[in-house]
Each structure stands twice: as structure tokens, then as C-alpha cells.
């Protein structure tokens, strides 16, 4: 996964250029979110300083949002509407990609899978 400055959201389809674009009808993981706060917490607790948030293979890194509260809810980011579907349940791969112990620490905090309801572009905010 590579980091980019913006991403084009395509309603009902996914992200332009993503491997899951048009994956299947009504796919719940058209876009995935992860919080900067959880990334920072894992870095501290697992003493990791050489991995970027891209290690988690989530599409968008957010800050200041309770992603679990968005499950079953419509929400908007930068003018693009989404429907929160389910937690991105962490798996054994997190221990390999980030550090041993990541899967356990991410239980109930693995991110959010969502469907895209409107077209638009999300930009990195610095």
C-alpha cells in the first residue's frame, strides 16, 4: 500500500486505483478507515518506530473520530458520504506486518469498513 495526497471515492464501487474497486456488488469494504490515535498507541505499546500507518492496509487514516460509533451510521468526511458497515477485524497478519501483539491490541479497534454513498475526493489534511 502506498501513501497518497488524495483519493477519489466512487459511490457504490470503491476507490479509484484500489485493488478492491468494483470487487463485488454491495461490498462493505469499499473504503476502510483507521485512526491515528490507534496507530500512535500501538507504536508506544509495542515500541515500534519504523512502520507507517500503511502497514495496517487501511485506506484512510483519521483523527478524532470514534470509528466504532459509526457502524450502521451514515457520515460525511470532506463532503463525501459513507455508510459505516463493520469493524475491520484484526487478524494474525497484523502481528507480521506491524509487530507481534498488534492483533491482540487491535481487538475492537481494527478500523471501519464502509460503503461509499457519494462521489468525491478526500485530501490529506496536514
Image (cartoon, rainbow, N blue to C red):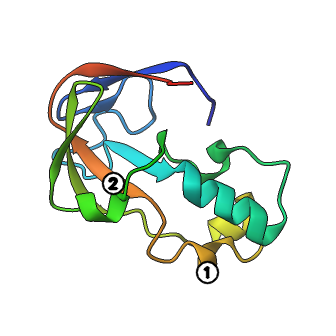
Q: On the rendered image, what quadrant is the N terminus found in?
A: top right
Residue named by callout 1: 104
Task: Tell me which residue sits at (44%, 75%) in the image.
Answer: 108
Residue named by callout 2: 113
Please identify the quarter of the rendering in which residue 46 is found: bottom right
Task: Tell me which residue sits at (75%, 60%) in the image.
Answer: 43
Closer to us: 84 or 77:
77
Q: On the rendered image, what quadrant is the C terminus found in?
A: top right
Secondary structure under the numbered disc 1 in the rendered image: helix
Label 1 crowd bin: few (<14), some (14–19), many (20+), radius 10 Å: some
State whether residue 119 is above or below residue 100: above
Q: Is residue 43 left or right of residue 118?
A: right
- Residue furthest toward the bottom? 104
State whether residue 66 is above or below residue 79: below
Q: Are marks 2 and 1 in contact (CB under 8 Å)?
A: no
Closer to us: 9 or 5:
5
Amino acid at each position: 500500500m502506498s501513501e497518497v495526497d488524495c483519493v477519489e471515492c466512487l459511490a457504490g464501487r470503491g476507490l479509484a486505483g484500489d485493488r478492491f474497486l468494483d470487487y463485488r456488488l454491495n461490498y462493505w469494504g469499499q473504503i476502510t478507515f483507521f485512526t491515528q490515535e490507534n496507530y500512535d498507541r500501538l507504536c508506544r505499546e509495542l515500541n515500534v518506530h519504523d512502520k507507517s500507518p500503511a502497514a495496517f492496509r487501511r485506506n484512510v487514516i483519521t483523527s478524532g473520530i470514534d470509528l466504532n460509533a459509526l457502524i450502521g451510521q451514515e457520515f460525511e468526511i470532506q463532503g463525501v458520504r459513507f455508510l459505516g458497515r463493520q469493524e475491520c477485524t484484526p487478524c494474525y497478519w497484523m502481528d507480521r506486518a506491524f509487530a507481534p501483539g498488534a492483533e491482540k491490541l487491535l481487538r475492537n479497534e481494527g478500523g471501519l469498513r464502509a460503503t461509499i454513498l457519494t462521489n468525491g475526493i478526500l485530501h490529506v489534511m496536514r
